[in-house]
Image (spheres, rainbow, N blue to C red):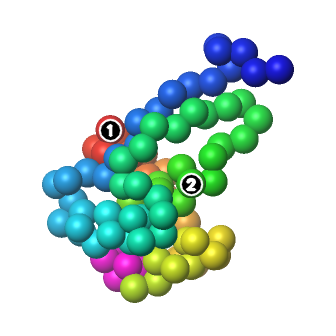
Amino acid sequence: MLRRYDTVLINMFLNEDDPFYEAKSKILTVNNQPPSKLYYLQYEALPQDLLRALRIQLLKPSELDHYGKVFEGKRVREQPLSLPRSGAEACRAG
């Protein structure tokens, strides 16, 4: 049973100040995922489309050519982002 307080509403959007905003926006749109969307986060699981949108947002310019891996569930980079960079990117985007 889903209770109202078991979910959190989050607005995910691409930062328009990102120099690669147009490319990232088009990547999401072409893959049937809007660049701005409200997500309902539940304790049991995170929405896969939210995770894909976050991964696209955090792509480095050198990784943009390999964006298809995100939608295939594959890694784009061998080393994960460090927590401080990821956190800073997420805060800047919000």
Asked if residue 54 is positioned above or below residue 7 in the image, the reply reads below
Tag 2 secondary structure: helix
- Quadrant in the picture for the N terminus: top right
Q: CA distance from mark 2 to mark 1?
A: 17 Å
Picture quarter with the C terminus: top left
Residue sitting at the far bottom? 65
Instruction: Find disc 2 in the rendering and name its residue.
Output: 49
Residue at screen point 46% across, 83% down: 66
Disc 1 residue type (three-letter): Gly
Whether residue 88 is visible to the viewer of this picture, yes or no, is no
**Residue ID for mark 1:** 94
| Residue 65 seen anywhere in this rendered image of the structure | yes
Residue farthest to the right, as pictured:
1
Please state which of the two labelled residues, at mark 2 or mark 1, is closer to the viewer.
2
Residue 61 within the segment the image draws in magenta: yes
The magenta segment is 60-64
User: Which numbered disc flags the more N-terminal residue, 2 or 1?
Assistant: 2
Residue at (72, 41) in percent of width and height: 45
Q: Main secondary structure of the magenta part?
A: helix
User: For mark 1, does the 10 Å Cα neighbourhood hold few (<14), some (14 to 19), or many (20 or more) residues?
Assistant: few
Classify mark 2: residues with Cα within 10 Å, few (<14), some (14-19) or many (20+): some
Q: Position of residue 30 (x, y in %)?
A: 42, 71
Q: Position of residue 90 (x, y in %)?
A: 39, 45
Secondary structure at numbered mark 1 = loop
Q: Look at 54% across and 50% down and name the residue there.
A: 50
Query: In this view of the protein, which residue sits in the foreground, 34 or 19?
Result: 34
Left or right: residue 5 compared with residue 89: right
Q: Position of residue 7 (x, y in %)?
A: 63, 24
Q: Is residue 63 above or below residue 91?
A: below
